Image (cartoon, rainbow, N blue to C red):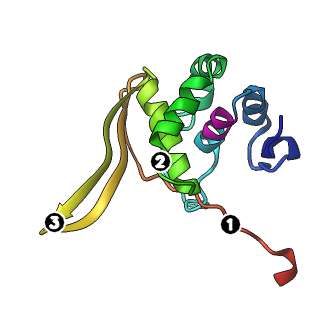
C-alpha cells in the first residue's frame, strides 16, 4: 500500500474506520471512504444535529465499497472522464458524485446547480440527495483543502 495511510497520516479517524479503509486496495476508494468519515474542520466544536448512527455511510455501505474495490476500473474510468483539473477540491467532488450516482442507497437530485437572483449567482448546490435507506434529504456543500504546516514558523 503506497499512499498516506501506511504512514498513519489520518490520526483523527477512529480505529474501526481506519481498519475498514486500509482494507481497500483502490486508492480512490480509500480517499472517498476517508472523506465520508472525516470530521469537518469548519464545524469543530459546534453542536450540530447529525445522527452519526444513521449516517455512518462507510459501515452501512461497506458492501458497496467492497464491490467497487473488486472492479477498480469503474471508479478509475469515471475519474478520467470527469476530471476537471488536478485541484484537490475538484477531485473530492468527483469522488462524492461517483458515490452518490453509483450507489442505490441514494437518489441524487441536484449537482452543481447555480442559484441566481437578478442574473447574479448567489450560491451553488454541490449535492442535494435523498438517503433511500433513512428517507432523509441532505444538502452538501463539498470542500476539501490541503493545508501545509511549517513547524519551524511557530
Q: Assign the C terminus to one quadrant of the image.
A: bottom right
Can the viewer see residue 154? no
Distance in Å between CA atoms under marks 2 and 3 = 30 Å
Earlier-in-chain disc, 2 versus 3: 2
Disc 3 element? strand
The residue lying at 79 percent from left, 30 percent from top is 19
Q: Quadrant of residue 137?
A: top left
Earlier-in-chain disc, 2 versus 1: 2
Q: Which residues are magenta?
A: 27-32
Residue placed under numbered mark 2 in the picture: 49
Residue placed under numbered mark 1 in the picture: 147
**In front of the other: label 2 or label 3?**
3
Vertical position of residue 61 compared to residue 16: above or below: above
Vertical position of residue 16 compared to residue 11: above or below: above
Residue 40: % across, % down:
58, 54
Residue placed under numbered mark 3 in the picture: 117
Q: Could you tell me how many numbered marks the image carries?
A: 3
Taking the image as shown, residue 119 lies to the left or right of residue 106, namely left
Residue 23: % across, % down:
77, 26
Taking the image as shown, residue 41 lies to the left or right of residue 97, namely right
Vertical position of residue 57 compared to residue 50: above or below: above
Q: Main secondary structure of the magenta part?
A: helix
**In front of the other: label 2 or label 1?**
1
Q: Residues within 10 Å of mark 3 (few under 14, many from 20)?
A: few
Amino acid at each position: 500500500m503506497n499512499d498516506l495511510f501506511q504512514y498513519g497520516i489520518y490520526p483523527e479517524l477512529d480505529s474501526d474506520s481506519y481498519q475498514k479503509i486500509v482494507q481497500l486496495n483502490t486508492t480512490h476508494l480509500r480517499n472517498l471512504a476517508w472523506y465520508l468519515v472525516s470530521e469537518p474542520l469548519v464545524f469543530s466544536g459546534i453542536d450540530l444535529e447529525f445522527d452519526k448512527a444513521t449516517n455512518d455511510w462507510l459501515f452501512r455501505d461497506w458492501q458497496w465499497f467492497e464491490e467497487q474495490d473488486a472492479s477498480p476500473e469503474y471508479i478509475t474510468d469515471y475519474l478520467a472522464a470527469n476530471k476537471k483539473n488536478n485541484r484537490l477540491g475538484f477531485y473530492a467532488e468527483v469522488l462524492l458524485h461517483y458515490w452518490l450516482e453509483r450507489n442505490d442507497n441514494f437518489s441524487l437530485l441536484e449537482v452543481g446547480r447555480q442559484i441566481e437572483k437578478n442574473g447574479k449567482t448567489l450560491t451553488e448546490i454541490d449535492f442535494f440527495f435523498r438517503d433511500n435507506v433513512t428517507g432523509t434529504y441532505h444538502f452538501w456543500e463539498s470542500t476539501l483543502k490541503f493545508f501545509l504546516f511549517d513547524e519551524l514558523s511557530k
